[in-house]
Amino acid sequence: MQRLLLVSFFVLASLTGCQLLGPQATPTPEGITWIKTVSPPEGSAQVPYQEFRLDNGLTVLLHQDHSDPLVKVDMRYHVGSSREEPGKSGFAHFFEHMMFEGSKHVDDHGKRIKEVGGYNNGSTDRDTTQYYQTVPANELERVLWLESDRMGFLLEAVSQRKFEVQRDTVKNERAYRIDNAPYGRVNETINQALYPEGHPYSWPVIGYVEDLDRVDVGDLKQFFLRWYGPNNATLTIGGDIDVQQTLAWVNKYFGDIPAGPEVADPEPQPITLEADRYVTLEDQISQPVLVITFPTGTPDTDTSTRLGVLASVLGQDRDSLLYQSLVQSGKLLSAGASHRCGELACTFELYGVGGQQQSLAEVETLLMDALATFEQQGVSKASIARIKTMAEADDIFALQSVDGKVEQLASDFSLFGDANRLEARLARLEAVTPENVMESFHRWLKGKPAVYLSVVPYERTDLVAKPANFVYQRPDYAQSVAPSQEKLPPRRTPENIDRTQVPPASGSVTVNVPKIYRADLDNGIHLAGTESRETPTVTLYMTLPAGTLMEPNDKRGLANLTAQMVTEGGAGMTAAELTQALKQLGSQASIEADEHETYITITALKKHVGETLQLVHKALSAPTFSEQDFTRVKAQLLEGMASRADDASWLADQATRELLFQDAVFRSPRGGVMEDIEALTIDDVRAFYRQHYVLKGSQLVVVGDVSRDQAVTLANQITPWQEAPRSQPQIARAVPRDEKQPQIWLVDKPKAPQTSIRMVRHGMPYDATGEMFITRLANFNLGGNFNSRINQNLRQDKGYTYGAGGGVYSGRQLGTIEFDADVRADATVDAINQLWQEMANAAENGFTPQELAYLRQSSGQRDALSYETPWEKAGLIAHVEEFGLPDNYRDEQQAIIQTIDLERLNQAARRWFNPNDYQIIVVGDAEQLAPELKALGLPVNPLTLEYR
């Protein structure tokens, strides 16, 4: 359901305090004006920054953070799908794609970022389009050169071929994200029913295929000229920067770009409904879902803050009303609430997920009864206090990365014209009371018209809440949309500097590799950690020897079920009471079973880390394990498993397991097997807990604002709650299955508009510097990055897919090598041919000196971006400890990368990339694909999965 609904969001300040505006202007180059400096008091979650404006209207926000040798650059244009015209949907998102296709002086934007160890991407929503990149700090000038070239010189590089290929890519993205995804069309369908025709939020961000088919290069150029001027953009730069040097570079590269047409801020357009609208959506799903959407007001107001609190109380955690009354009781599989805002309007959503045969009329009744209960009970001051505490913690955690800080500044300024807004948000949150939350409930939800969307499996309209009284009929825009009357002339940027040369790096960077401390404690815990003093937070990552490979062969799913049961309550507290206790501390904790261990993750403010760890320890050491909870959790788990096969990626994953392994454990799905879980009892859970939830063989990783001695003290608070068994846990061993020749295995997914293709073979267990690592390097240019041969062929050249590539995947026991692509159905056969040819070419002919140079360039400074956040540091330490690696193993890897020759890479390619050693999995509409696949000259086998 994460794809279906997003939780309500509102960014809130953590501490009160008067913010200081710099009394003196920062010196600036000619053509740049200092606007203000925001210097919050110590402890505030408001990000400090300086604001400048160029004469051409470009706004520049600068934030200095010297804690890590990296910099993030965010270029945000105040144009999203809401600026499009009716009948011309998808322009903004389409243009985002075109912005990566090179400009007059830049052949490939993404490659120029990747080759210095950086990463980049873009995104489009209803209100803005964002382009962002994070690079080592010494490459900031390169990024500014790149961003300025596509702002000032994009249209000179736009060609008909690039246009056609990216139009196909956008169509493939729509198929992948929406048309071939379970529940993918939900938001689109809601917006069609909620907003009147012509409202800027009534069409999808990605656009309609028929509109994309009508667009031409001229339309696209006019869209750029209208919206992509510097006066409609915000450039936000954060990280290890020198302000004066940064301003000089900004002026050098952006100062000569002429302003575009004047852009007025859009006026809010909230809407109302006169009556309930019932809508039906049939989809390739198993579980029916009801989504109820109420129109509300506008963003960043008292109303939106109160409705955000209301959504949290109603349905955003295990202590919420909807969870307690509908999910905890076993009446629904899932239920929740959210308040979602765009720049123009907001909506309040409730949803309920039913069982496979459950009527959505019953779901509607349950949701309405829950609202009636809420009206009677109201909201408590304690609930609001917990929300405020979590907001404080969330704001502090957001300061852990430059990404988070830049995002906060860029978003606020782009949408509201001011990046200094946290104090105002805090004031609104502080003003929330039980009374005004209830007032908002009555004003916006109680008895108000809404859109009721019933999402049901195909041919199961008997499950809808009510028969549809609204069916969207889109006008025939092909006949009614007239060409735009306004023709904007080209804007010519003078070439006063040499833009043909890539700017050199400004010196070198020093990577801050975490220094790991260790201790083996008397309680059985192996402690490993590092200090991270940037924020007053602590991250803990604990593992217990309770993995899925320790399950008996006839109890697959037991480790996962045990982990879920641990969260149902313990130490005399219910799941809701545990959730509330954590919220009161501003902490979060979760538990999940993996192959070799069950891991518990904890985040806490430094001031509350001891209390948080004690709370988790109590719950972990004395789980309730009630029969009632077990019956409900097992039933919900089985229902959830029924929906796995709705997803093409899951089907391909499972086909991979069944083709490569013949033992019961390794060929079974992640999360277990239905028949095994059906037979499990609460005694099985208790026995697994007694056997495996022990401190002997456990590990605790601590990263945060604590010293080694403090970490040891924390870890020693975890006392053994039961004795470890005398015998070592038995770990399942894989039994490989090998086919003697390549074959095609066809998994049926009826009516699928896309085909999921996967070529798979056995690989190697993990190693840090041996054959597996070398093979992973060899794959870099074949399928391991955006500019790889496979992606360039299938996406950039053929337009078959939204993305294609491959990976060398390895664990403690074994590994796989997989190449994959989700392609439009009519391109399936040629896509398989192209994959085969690319792999065969790499195996037979190897790689080029240019590709070796690109591999070295891309990897040389990559570590500068690898250890910024506590989670990244904890991940590194956990990896080192899991595989017993030396602390400096990354240095050893870099030495290999910089000295490896082509013959060694080509040797790995010959050994591991020969397509004759692979099995080909095809997930799609078998009726359509089976006859076509015979043209490949390989055996075509229908594959009915043993486990679904």
Image (spheres, rainbow, N blue to C red):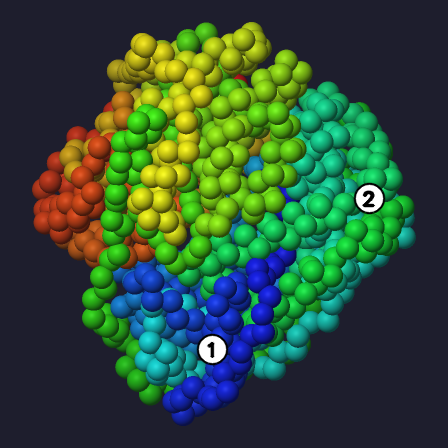
x and y percentages locating residue 784 in the rendered image: 30, 44
Q: Is residue 932 visible?
A: no
Judged from this view, the residue extending furthest toward the bottom is 30
Which type of secondary structure does the marked residue at label 2 adopt? loop
Q: Along the horizontal axis of the image, is 64 left or right of 565?
A: left
Specify the label residue 324 is tagged with.
Answer: none
| Residue receiving disc 2 | 378
Amino acid type, label 2: Gly
| Residue receiving disc 1 | 50
x and y percentages locating residue 272 in the rendered image: 84, 57
Q: Is residue 488 above or below residue 73?
A: below
Q: Along the horizontal axis of the image, is 320 left or right of 295?
A: left
Q: Quadrant of residue 644?
A: top right
Point out the image quarter for the N terminus: top right
Which is more toward the observer, 105 or 139?
A: 139
x and y percentages locating residue 726 in the rendered image: 32, 10
Which is more toward the observer, 778 or 692?
A: 692
Q: Quadrant of residue 912?
A: top left
Amino acid type, label 1: Gln
Numbered marks: total: 2
Q: Quadrant of residue 439?
A: bottom right
> Residue at position x 64%, y 28% from top?
574
- First in sequence, mark 1 or 2: give its number: 1
> Residue at position x 70%, y 38% from top?
320
Q: Which is closer to the viewer, label 1 or label 2?
A: 2
Q: Along the horizontal axis of the image, is 648 left or right of 693?
A: right
> Residue at position x 24%, y 58% from top?
511
Q: How would you rate the neighbour count of disc 1 (Cα within 10 Å): few for under 14, some for 14-19, many for 20 or more?
A: many
